[in-house]
Image: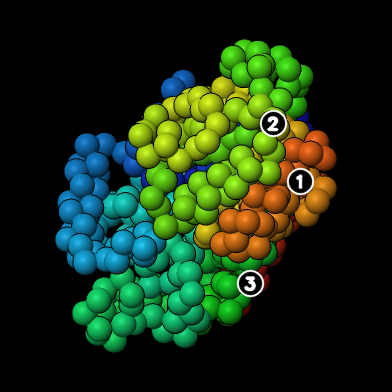
Amino acid sequence: MDKVVGDIKGKRIVHLQFGSSPSGNYTIRLHEAFLEYGFDSYVLSLHSDVQGDPRIVSLGKFAKNLRKVNQKIQDFLTRKKPQDAGAFSLSFLGSDISGHELVQKADIIYVHWILGGFLSVRNLKQIAALGKPMVMILHDMWAITGGCSYSFDCDKFLTQCGNCPIFPEDKEVDTAFRQHVEKKRLYASFNNIFFVSPSHWLSDLAKRSEITMNKPVFRIPNPIDRRRFKPFDKRVAKGILGMEEFDFVICFGANKVHSPYKGWMYLKEAVSRLAERVEGSKIGVLIFGSVATEEIMQSIPFPTKFMGFIRDDYTTNLVYNASDVFLAPSLADNLPTTIIESLCCGTPVVGFDTGGIPEMISHGKNGYVANYKDAEDFSKGIEYCLQNRLVGELLPEFNTDVVMGHHMDLVSFIEKEISVGDNN
């Protein structure tokens, strides 16, 4: 398929990503899309579970041991973190991959989620010093904050992080302050660093953040393979999973129910209220990403089937198709892959009005956008989708052709910028 034209055809793209997995991995999907559109794409990871693709490479034992040491340091320094606080990633140790063959031969380097001891800010500086274009993909807020993945109500990152809620010692010059300064120096020192956010929400924050407001920031959603995620007869899908007896099936992911991001307390309340709203209807529940737990079983007033952690896209596709509505009660999220997958399978989505979620859901058409942290409205949204038999539909801007068109425009822009810089 010859989809790339001009002098950008055949450009070698190298994606840097902490882990590569065969299911639900945005980096792998972008890598595959680049290949399909005529680019020479590779992935370099710390860990990889992908089999049979020589273009996906992982580092050796030393790098993995270094990651373990970094994790121990992070666990110690964040040991007093409040339970309701989100993730905070420290950038102490990481691997110098600037001399790796894939990095050396790259024309453009896409930096995805590289924390957890894979790469540090110092390592990013080593890569930037090569002079190659470096595209920072903002899958969460870490690149524009002092270290948190989502800041919730804290807006210190807009000026200067410090006295961070993660560290209760009440010090202005804390770890968050130092990492904020370290990133600011990195971004200010190089003109070959560009930023891409999958959502308007995060791209707007990046343009306002003190450390990235003067850098090029683009909004490009994550791609989805619609050959894998597509609708088929729900009766067949329900039959395969043994859910054919139910009038309606609702579905949600429950990998970490107590995560401050996932909104479990609002979800279980909303589902309990749903039981009162639709009394007389036979409703079944599909849960993936978790094994059966006593807490979940006692909280859900409907018959429940646990799918566990799904490791392939085909089973994931089956689960969405067997569902009449997908629930996404996230309290902080960028552009959740699960919502895109569900809509591709024709299943509507109920989510809160937060982050990039409202950008994917056309309220009342392909789903329902509930008021933030409002379990009652979330419950109404589930009922609305079921009673109106809403059909999920991916909005046009998320189609792969559109997404890759933006990436080709970005590559062309980078080529021009680098050329102008060289001439100056």
Is residue 243 visible from the viewing direction of this image? Answer: yes
Q: Which mark, by number, is residue 384?
A: 1
Disc 1 secondary structure class: helix
For marks 3 and 2 on the same chain, the one whose residue lies earlier in the sequence: 3
Position of residue 259 relative to residue 315, above or below, is below
Residue drawn at (50%, 37%) of the image: 300
Three-letter amino acid code of the residue under disc 2: Gly
- Residue 346 in picture, x, y percent from top left: 75, 33
Please report the residue visible at 70 percent of the width from the left and 56 percent of the height from the top: 369
The residue under label 2 is 280
Identify which residue, 381 or 17, lies in the foreground.
Answer: 381
Q: In which quarter of the image is residue 225?
A: top right
Q: Residue at x 59, y 35 (%)?
A: 251
* 2 or 1: mark nearer the eye: 2
Asked if the residue at tag 1 contacts the one at tag 2, i.e. Cβ–Cβ closer than 8 Å, the answer is: no
Q: Which amino acid does label 3 sit on?
A: Asp
Q: Residue at x 63, y 66 (%)?
A: 201
Residue 12 picture quarter: top right
Q: Is mark 3 on a helix, strand or loop?
A: helix
Mark toward the start of the polypeptide (1 vs 3): 3
| Res. 204 mark | 3
Q: Which of marks 2 and 1 is nearer the N terminus?
A: 2
Q: In this view, does 31 lie to the left or right of 114?
A: right
Identified by mark 1, the residue type is: Tyr
